[in-house]
Every structure is written in structure tokens, then in C-alpha cells.
């Protein structure tokens, strides 16, 4: 009888291939060993097969690191468990086939192929798989999700406008065409992980699938976004043009001192909105961005030096207080000393 149950479980697994890396899947038949492995990535409070399904337990899973996302797709026979709370870390469980009942914050949230996405904003939740599960589970950074939503709307929009929409557990049941299409696009995104040539060439990393996943989730989980996007697009375009003009001015004046007060005056942004705008576009503050641009322009000059150029001269040209500070920052960013790059630049131009 035990062999019959295991055979049925294996046959069901074969009939439900994983969405990516199916042939590389790791197989677990020991619930405790799997619980120990899951505890390395999740706050596992409780885990085990559902009563009556112990003998047929089977779990197949494959994982892929996409930016800061660890995506795990898997197939499992009936199990149940509890995932503990983690502040600032949201849970996404996307079902391709099967049935799961989640319990979170006193509410029962059933998930199946018709309402396939469960979201929890770092709260503890229980789950019970009634038949089987074939899908994808992963954690998301809630602050990054809020910042992504703000960036979609446009420069100067605070991430805090989306805090309330990302503060409660729910199941998505897409009824209208837009949400259905967004969910379909999200599912197809995961299929791109099964492109070995893109992975080998590094193109998969360059595609920044983690950004696409975050943008898709922001659009699905933040209904307010659609209204904000549609409201006054001309004003949004104007603000973005002002910001682009500010970037162009900054790049043209890297050889002069640039401070926050100047950036505020030229753009009309408050200091807070200026910080927010740079964080949304570049992931850093305005002065950090200016410093990065100085280093990048200095790198260009080191590779294309004038006959009398020196490291100290180039450092001074872009406002660094000393060649030692410049060399430290340059080595930290490019992992090599500027003197080496200058020698290569002079050698190349001499040979030319």
C-alpha cells in the first residue's frame, strides 16, 4: 500500500511539471529534512504532512536567485504549517494548480487557480494544502515594493502613499481584463528563467527580472496606482522634464562645487522631494549621485588622458579634496587604482 501511495504521488508530480528548472528539481520524501531546509529561508513555526497523507509525502522544488529575490517553485502533496511574522518582509504565494487554505489575521483565505495569488505583509499565517500545490513562493522587500509603486507614478510621489494598500493579507481574484493580463504577465516572467542560453551569457541578469516582478506586483497590489497614473499626465511629464534638465545641468558642472541648496534652487524641488526623486531613479541620494558622476567622468579622463594629465590633476579637476581621497573612492567603485587606469590610457594613446 505504501509503494502504491508513493507511486501515485510520483505520477502526479510528473503530470505537474515545475514552472522553471523542472529537470533540476530537488526531491524530498522526509518531512523533517525538508522542514530543516525551509527554516534556512523562512520563519517556520510548524510544518508537516496533513493527517492521513504521511505515506504519500513528496516535495519537488527548484530555486533561482533573481536580483535580491529567491524564487522557489515547487510541487507538494498535502501538507500544513505555519510561517512566522517577519517585519518588513512580505510573502507571495502564486498557485498554478492545486488548492490551499490560508489563515491570517483571523480570516480564511482560500487560493486556487481562479484566485491564485496570496499576499501577506510580514504577518504570521497558517496554510493547509488540501490536494496538491504547484506554484511559486518567495519573499519581497515591502519598502522596495512601496518605492516601486511611487516610482511608477512619477517623481516626487512619496512611497508612504501606498503603505495602507500593502498593510493587510489578501487573495487576488482577478475579474477585469487589466488584472488578468497583469497576472498572466507575471506568470510568463517566471518562464524566462528556463532560458539556459540567456543565463549562460549573463543576459538574464541584464534583463533585471526582479524589477519587472516588483513593478507587476505593485500594479496588482496597489489599486490606487491606476488612478494616480491617469491623473494629470501632463503635469507628471513636466516634473520629469525638470528633473532631466537638472541631471543635464549637473553633468555639465561636475568640475564645480555642487550642493543640495543649488539643486533645490534649480529644480524647485524641496530637499525631501529631491532626495525621494533621486532614490526612485538611481537608488541613492543626490550628492551620492553627483559623486558617482564625478568618478565616472574621471574614469573617462584616465582612459583618454591629455599629455600632461596626472591622477592628482584629474582628481582636482572633479572637485576631490585630495588624490588620496580620490584614489580610495575610485578603488572602492571600480576595484582598481586610478594610477593603473591612467597608465593604460597613456599606453593606448601612445600606441595609437
Image (cartoon, helix red, strand yellow):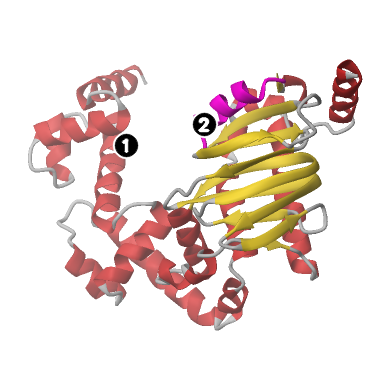
> Helix or strand or loop: what does disc 2 sit on?
loop
* x then y, percent, for residue 166: 52, 64
Q: Does 30 lie within the magenta span?
A: yes
Residue with the mark numbered 2: 39
Q: Is residue 14 left or right of residue 305?
A: right
Q: Toward which corner of the image does residue 226 lie, by quadrant?
A: bottom right
Q: Nearer the viewer, residue 35 or 346?
A: 35
Query: Which of the image's four quarters has the C terminus?
Result: top left
Q: Nearer the viewer, residue 329 or 296?
A: 329
Range shown magenta = 29-42
Query: Which of the image's four quarters has the N terminus?
Result: top right
Q: At x 29% / y 34%, what residue is drawn?
A: 333
Q: Are marks 1 and 2 in contact (CB under 8 Å)?
A: no
Q: Nearer the viewer, residue 335 or 125?
A: 125
Classify 321 as above or below 202. Answer: below
Mark carried by residue 228: none
Q: Toward which corner of the image does residue 26 lie, by quadrant?
A: top right
> Helix or strand or loop: what does disc 1 sit on?
helix
Residue 188 in sight in this render: no
Q: At x 79% / y 32%, what residue is drawn?
A: 53
Classify 258 as above or below 330. Answer: below
What's the distance in space between the residues labelled 1 and 2, CA to CA? 47 Å
Amino acid at each position: 500500500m505504501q509503494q502504491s501511495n508513493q507511486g501515485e504521488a510520483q505520477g502526479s508530480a510528473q503530470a505537474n511539471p515545475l514552472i522553471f528548472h523542472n529537470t533540476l528539481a530537488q526531491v524530498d520524501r522526509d518531512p523533517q529534512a525538508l522542514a530543516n531546509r525551509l527554516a534556512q529561508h523562512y520563519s517556520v513555526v510548524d510544518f508537516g504532512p496533513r493527517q492521513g497523507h504521511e505515506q504519500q509525502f513528496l516535495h519537488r522544488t527548484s530555486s533561482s536567485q533573481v536580483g535580491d529575490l529567491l524564487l522557489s517553485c515547487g510541487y507538494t502533496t498535502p501538507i500544513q504549517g505555519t510561517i512566522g511574522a517577519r517585519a518588513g518582509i512580505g510573502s507571495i504565494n502564486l498557485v498554478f494548480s492545486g488548492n490551499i487554505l490560508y489563515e491570517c489575521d483571523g480570516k480564511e483565505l482560500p487560493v486556487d487557480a481562479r484566485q491564485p495569488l496570496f499576499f501577506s505583509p510580514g504577518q504570521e499565517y497558517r496554510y493547509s494544502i488540501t490536494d496538491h500545490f504547484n506554484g511559486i513562493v518567495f519573499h519581497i522587500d515591502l519598502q522596495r515594493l512601496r518605492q516601486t509603486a511611487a516610482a511608477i507614478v512619477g517623481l516626487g510621489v512619496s512611497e508612504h502613499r501606498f503603505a495602507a494598500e500593502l498593510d493587510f493579507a489578501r487573495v487576488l481574484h482577478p475579474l477585469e481584463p487589466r488584472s488578468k493580463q497583469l497576472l498572466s504577465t507575471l506568470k510568463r516572467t517566471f518562464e524566462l528563467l528556463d532560458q539556459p542560453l540567456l543565463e549562460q551569457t549573463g543576459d538574464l541578469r541584464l534583463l533585471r527580472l526582479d524589477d519587472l516582478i516588483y513593478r507587476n506586483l505593485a500594479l496588482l497590489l496597489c489599486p490606487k496606482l491606476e488612478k494616480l497614473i491617469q491623473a494629470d499626465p501632463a503635469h507628471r511629464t513636466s516634473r520629469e522634464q525638470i528633473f532631466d534638465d537638472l541631471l543635464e545641468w549637473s553633468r555639465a558642472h561636475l568640475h564645480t562645487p555642487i550642493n543640495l541648496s543649488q539643486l533645490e534652487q534649480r529644480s524647485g524641488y524641496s530637499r525631501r522631494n529631491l532626495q525621494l526623486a533621486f532614490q526612485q531613479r538611481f537608488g541613492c541620494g543626490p550628492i551620492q549621485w553627483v559623486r558617482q558622476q564625478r568618478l565616472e567622468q574621471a574614469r573617462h579622463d584616465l582612459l583618454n588622458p591629455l599629455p600632461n594629465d596626472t591622477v592628482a590633476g584629474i582628481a582636482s579637476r572633479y572637485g576631490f579634496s585630495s588624490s588620496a581621497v580620490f584614489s580610495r573612492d575610485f578603488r572602492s567603485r571600480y576595484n582598481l587604482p586610478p594610477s593603473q587606469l591612467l597608465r593604460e590610457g597613456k599606453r593606448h594613446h601612445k600606441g595609437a
